[in-house]
Image (tube, helix red, strand yellow):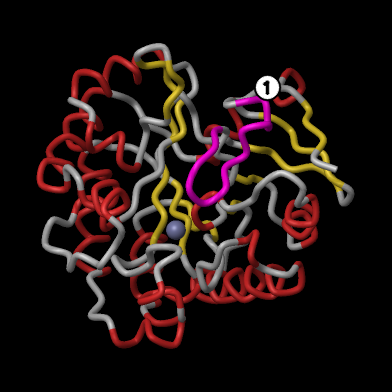
Amino acid sequence: MNILTCDIEDWFHLLDIPATANVENWDNFTSRIHGNVDRLLEIIQLHGHSATFFCLGWVAEKYPEVIRKIDASGFEIATHTHTHQLVYQQKPEQFCQDIRRSICTLEDITGKKVKSFRAPGFSIIPGMPWAFETLVELGIERDSSIFPLARGHGGFATFGSARPAIIECGGGTLKEFPISLGRLWGKQIVFSGGGYYRLLPYRTVQKLTTKSDYLMSYFHPRDFDPEQPVLDLPLFRRFKSYVGLQRAFTKFDRWLAENEFIDMLVADEAIDWDSVPRISVN
Ligand SMILES: [Zn+2]
């Protein structure tokens, strides 16, 4: 199964950059969210796929029409927190308040329960069982915050599964949809979003896709926007953030044409949860 997901945030919601870290400064940036989300919705609908959209509560509060449009298009509205902070830098109470606020904002707009979550930058790392407990407490049933390799903003290399699993934590259980991996040049990589997706030739991405029986993708509206302002980043991050933007949309279009994609709701129903690994995070 191939699962299509997008994190709904603006071009300036990059993590760990002094210029964009402070939520109070976000009003100073000119938003590009409307046009970029429209493009995404159109292309996904054109190919007849479903998708899950992890939306920032901040975006929802400022531009509720964007959330209404995604919802009206028949896509799942999920949460990506309210203010896009790295979870491992938050205190449990801050994390809880931030997600609760995003859930309330999104539910007020759509009138539907929010049941899926993804952490900004996949920033739930080992040794944070409270994060999963908070999600359970807030009524979240499906999580897609596990990046099962080491990475800049955390990652959870010791999770032990790049396939659906049940997370057991103090407060109960969560259905986990980790980011999937592919093998290239003898190395495990994440190819279904981010820099690798844009950097690798199309045929390599397609080959890795065909080989995967579980694929979890992650895109952002800015991933297909070559006109976005370029932020002042260290060289490697600049490369990772902006490489391949020009061709990304054409590649995405072809990828959507050649493969089937579902959202997390459909995937949830298709997975036999009794047969997946149960992983304790306590
Ligand atoms: Zn994000």
Question: For this view, does 239 lie left or right of residue 179?
Answer: left
Over which residues does the magenta segment extend?
149-161
Position in image of residue 275 (x %, y %): 73, 18
Question: For this view, does 145 lie left or right of residue 42?
Answer: right
The front one of 247 and 239 is 239
Residue ID at (68%, 31%): 158
Position in image of residue 21 (x %, y %): 44, 74
Question: For this view, does 45 lie left or right of residue 114?
Answer: left
Residue ID at (33%, 53%): 220
The front one of 11 and 16 is 16
The C terminus - image quarter? top right
What amino acid type should be assigned to the residue bearing mark 1?
Asp
Q: Secondary structure at mark 1?
A: loop
Q: Please name the residue that numbered disc 1 is placed on.
A: 272
**Magenta region, main secondary structure:** loop
- Whether residue 134 appears in magenta in the rendering, the answer is no
Residue furthest out toward the front: 235
Question: For this view, does 267 lie left or right of residue 142?
Answer: left
Image quadrant, ligand 1: bottom left
Q: Is residue 243 above or below residue 56?
A: above
Residue ID at (65%, 38%): 176
Q: Is residue 212 above or below residue 41?
A: above
- Whether residue 157 appears in magenta in the rendering, the answer is yes
The front one of 190 and 102 is 190
Residue ID at (61%, 33%): 157
Q: Is residue 161 above or below residue 155?
A: above
Q: Is residue 258 above or below residue 173?
A: above
Q: Using a 10 Å C-alpha cutoff, classify the residue at mark 1 as few (fewer than 14 neighbours), some (14 to 19) or many (20 or more).
A: few
